[in-house]
Image (tube, rainbow, N blue to C red):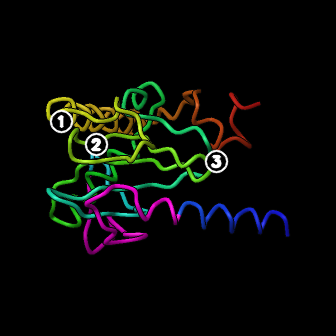
Amino acid sequence: ELFEAQAIAQARAIIEDDATLFPGFRPIAMELPFGGDDSPFEFGGARIRGRMDRVDEGPGGVLVTDYKSGSTISGAEQFEKDRLFQPVIYAAAASHVLGRPCLGGIYRSLSTHDVRGFYLAGTVDTCGHGNAKDGLDDEAFSTLVESTEQRVRAVVHQMSTGDVSPTPGRTCEYCLAQPFCEVAR
């Protein structure tokens, strides 16, 4: 009962907070699917499918939010080091599905209400929940998307040659291969 009460309180708090987050934007989709058989989506040489937690529409484009239960979420400057692809892939997928420019991909911590990720500077107001380092100019935004696509392409190539060696890092905390991974033992 205590866990359920805490979960309900946490959900209420984030919903209230989200109502004023990203002024000028409005939610247009929840659990938006992409990459299905009817609308294939390719990024970095891989066909990808998934669901975006939330997509908002604002002046000039859309913004993707992915909710995370943990308190530690990464910003744009950590994507390569932490081997994170999701925010950039989801941003590209939103643009593909909706036919609108995507202004960024955001992680939203359910526990701390923090906002991290990447977005086009000057287009998104995080209402004090974000980090200014995540607002990128046009060139840095394009570079991040291109470098992420190159990183995905490299992983796809590595896997296509049969190399599925573990690459230890922060993602090991929630990797589904833990039960049989040599590194996790």
Which quadrant holds residue 150? top left
Tally of marks: 3
Q: Which residues are magenta?
A: 15-42
Element type at mark 3: loop
- Mark with earlier residue (1, 2): 2
Amino acid at the residue labelled 3:
Leu
- Residue, disc 3: 176
Amino acid at the residue labelled 1:
Ser
Element type at mark 2: strand
Which quadrant holds residue 71? top right
- Determine crowd level at label 1: few under 14, some 14-19, many 20+ residues with C-alpha closer than 10 A: few
| Residue at figure coordinates x 45%, y 32% from the top left | 83
| Residue at figure coordinates x 30%, y 57% from the top left | 23
| Residue at figure coordinates x 23%, y 66% from the top left | 97
- Mark with earlier residue (2, 3): 2
- Residue, disc 2: 119
Q: Is residue 170 magenta?
A: no
Rendered view: 78 above or below 9: above
Nearest to viewer (mark 2 / mark 3): 2
- Residue, disc 1: 142
The location of residue 38, given as percent across then percent down, is: 27, 75
Q: Nearer the viewer, residue 114 or 138?
A: 114
The location of residue 70, given as percent across then percent down, is: 62, 46
In screen coordinates, is 51 left or right of 12? Answer: left
Q: Is residue 26 magenta?
A: yes
Which image quadrant: the N terminus? bottom right
- Determine crowd level at label 2: few under 14, some 14-19, many 20+ residues with C-alpha closer than 10 A: many
The location of residue 44, given as percent across then percent down, is: 27, 43
Amino acid at the residue labelled 2:
Tyr
